[in-house]
Image: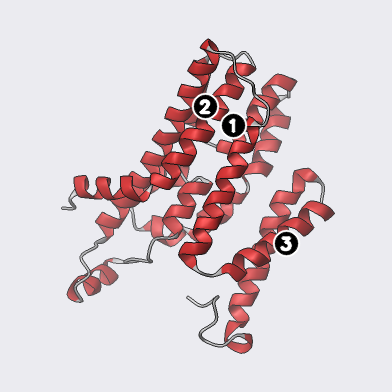
């Protein structure tokens, strides 16, 4: 049996960057919701059930504009379509987590994906786990599953706590809301820089950023995010497939 307490403590330490970011942008979301004259309880319900940072920010604007159900659903689909790519990337890891995979799929936000995708590959099957233990690697499939679950659950808790604090504070104290919507973008930038330092493959990010700028210029705003992601995935995958021919085995794309 895995030592769940030790895994939880390890998950807390590993998720501290998201804790700092989610409390800040969660508070910002709560303040925006309160500024739109919605009750603080709505921030709790949205954060627990919906749990989509950018989607929740956009939902406040949709509520205020009186958007219809179909319009709101279409906007949310386009904004959150990137999660399909996240899910495909994490498919092998989540398939080995048993019943925990259903929550892991639900809780896969941008920031949680950044943390979980940065983990070492770990055992991908029971055979891999046995082989790892034979070579002195203690982690099992169950330990990896619970660690990912705790990271996801903690991130969810951070976001919910921040949004409720912000909404409650906004209901009681008047705030100047100028520029507060930039909090989410700021967190993405911080996580991007951290990923570059951790993964040490800057060319992947440079290529993706270049394509994102082009997509934002060429495509309508409602499609630019989705098209930028799709094109980036295709281009990066093409470079990875060609690395043996163009870059050689030791390319920064390798691994």
Element marked by disc 1: helix
The image quadrant of residue 95 is: bottom left
> Residue at position x 57%, y 22% from top?
31
Element marked by disc 2: helix
Q: Which residue is mark 2?
A: 46
> Residue at position x 64%, y 21% from top?
176
**Mark 2–mark 1 distance (CA, rounded to whole Å):** 7 Å
Q: Does the residue at mark 3 contact the one at mark 1 (Cβ under 8 Å)?
A: no
Q: Locate residue 151, reporting x and y percent.
A: 36, 46
Residue 85 in view, yes or no: yes
Of callouts 3 and 1, the N-terminal one: 1
Q: Locate residue 126, reporting x and y percent.
A: 27, 66
Q: Which mark is residue 56?
A: 1
Q: Which residue is mark 3?
A: 211
Q: Locate residue 237, reporting x and y percent.
A: 61, 71
Residue 236 sits above or below residue 99 on the image:
below
Q: Residues within 10 Å of mark 2 (few under 14, many from 20)?
A: some
The image quadrant of residue 153 is: top left
Q: Locate residue 146, reporting x and y percent.
A: 29, 49
Q: Residue furthest left?
A: 1
The image quadrant of residue 119 is: bottom left
**Mark 3–mark 1 distance (CA, rounded to whole Å):** 26 Å
Q: Does the residue at mark 2 contact the one at mark 1 (Cβ under 8 Å)?
A: yes
């Amino acid at each position: 049996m895995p030592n769940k307490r030790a895994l939880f403590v390890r998950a807390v330490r590993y998720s501290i960057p998201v804790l700092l970011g989610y409390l800040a942008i969660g508070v910002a979301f709560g303040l925006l919701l309160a500024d739109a004259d919605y009750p603080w309880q709505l921030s709790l319900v949205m954060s627990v059930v919906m749990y989509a940072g950018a989607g929740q920010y956009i939902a406040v604007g949709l509520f205020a504009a009186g958007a219809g159900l179909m319009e709101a659903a279409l906007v949310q689909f386009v904004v959150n379509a990137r999660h399909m790519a996240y899910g495909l990337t994490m498919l092998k890891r989540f398939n080995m987590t048993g019943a925990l995979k259903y929550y892991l799929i639900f809780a896969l936000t941008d920031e949680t994906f950044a943390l979980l995708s940065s983990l070492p590959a770990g055992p991908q099957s029971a055979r891999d786990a046995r082989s790892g233990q034979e070579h002195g690697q203690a982690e099992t499939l169950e330990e990896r599953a619970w660690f990912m679950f705790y990271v996801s659950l903690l991130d969810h808790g951070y976001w919910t706590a921040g949004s409720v604090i912000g909404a409650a504070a906004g209901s009681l104290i008047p705030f100047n809301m100028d520029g507060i919507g930039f909090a989410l973008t700021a967190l993405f930038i911080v996580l991007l820089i951290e990923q570059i330092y951790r993964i040490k493959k800057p060319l992947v990010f440079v290529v993706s950023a270049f394509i994102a700028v082009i997509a934002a210029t060429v495509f309508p705003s409602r499609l630019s995010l989705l098209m930028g992601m799709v094109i980036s995935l295709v281009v990066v995958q093409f470079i990875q497939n060609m690395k043996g021919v163009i870059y050689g085995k030791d390319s920064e794309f390798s691994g």
